[in-house]
Amino acid sequence: MIVVTGAARGLGKAYATTLAQNRAIVVLNDIPGSEVESVAEGLRASGAQALASVHSVASPEEGAAIVEETLGRYGRIDGLVNNAGILRNAPFAKLSADELLGVLAVNLHGVLNVGRPAFRAMQEAGYGRILNVSSASVFGYAGFSAYAASKGAVLALTGTMAQEGSQAGIKVNALFPAATTPMADSFHTSKKKPDASELDAARARMTARFHPEGVAELVAVLMSEACTVTNEAFSAIAGRYARVSFAVANGWLAEDDEMRADRIFAHFDQVRDMSGALIPENTQSEIMAVSRRMLELRGN
């Protein structure tokens, strides 16, 4: 039994449809006035088990209602795809507080508002799969500072959720999707840049493979009981599936008397060299790696 938020159209609809085709019971959530009920009805007409849940993830009360409705109907919640999201396009210097808060309310708070009650239900059951939809915008995307900030927060939150869920059989991962959808189109057409022609050409070459269904197949893998990875992020773009990581360079380890700006600058190429980089599994990973290097440096 899997809940998919933002499931009325685009990627969310594709996720819910593919999960249903893989015989999952699906609860499709979206806001009032959306087409989520007709999407659920269409899935039921095809023989799938699907329920529409019309609530806004931006509200803690309505987020909890999605989970309560699911538990009341099915008695459990096995999976959650935190997909609901919105865009507000504005350069960083011109971003208003209202624009920022509006994006955070859905993209970040929505993950918290639905994720917390779902997480608690999964803890009690001793099983769960959660997929938080992040974005490649975390690498930087001019004009979308609010969206990138929200998705970066979702990525960071994923790691903490995975750590806390590890003892309860809850696997939590993040997804960086790319496909042709109304929201994705606004990314690429709202503000053309000088180098846009090269990007447009690259997208044109992938058009036939740039469909939501290709991303949804990876979602089906990550939400399955057979998939036991956790605290990882994955990219899906035009049929290319890949793990995404944030890594820490091996860097330069200073002697006790070398921790000075001039010595750091003298070794700055080494500081920036990403060969042999560490992919941290948790917050402690970097501390342990540096400690081991200190022991080696001192010959212990």
Image (cartoon, helix red, strand yellow):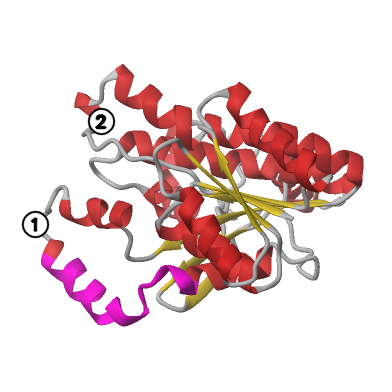
Q: Compare marks 2 and 1 and give the one earlier in the sequence.
A: 2
Regarding mark 1 in the picture, which secondary structure is present there?
loop
Q: Is residue 297 above or below residue 86?
A: below
Q: Where residue 1 sits: x, y (%)? A: 74, 55
Mark 2 residue crowding within 10 angstroms, few (<14) / some (14–19) / many (20+): few
Residue at the limit of the structure toward the left, as seen here:
194
Residue in the picture at 56% in, 65% down: 43
Q: Nearer the viewer, residue 45 or 1?
A: 45
Magenta: main secondary structure: helix
Q: Quadrant of residue 195?
A: bottom left
Q: Nearer the viewer, residue 117 or 268?
A: 117
Residue in the picture at 43% in, 42% down: 85
Range covered by the magenta-colored residues: 197-214
Residue 300 horizontal side relative to residue 69, left or right:
right
Mark 1 residue crowding within 10 angstroms, few (<14) / some (14–19) / many (20+): few
Residue ID for mark 1: 194
Q: Is residue 8 above or below residue 145?
A: below
* Magenta span includes 207: yes
Residue ID for mark 2: 92
Residue in the picture at 62% in, 38% down: 157
What's the mark number on residue 175?
A: none
- Residue type of the residue flagged with mark 1: Pro
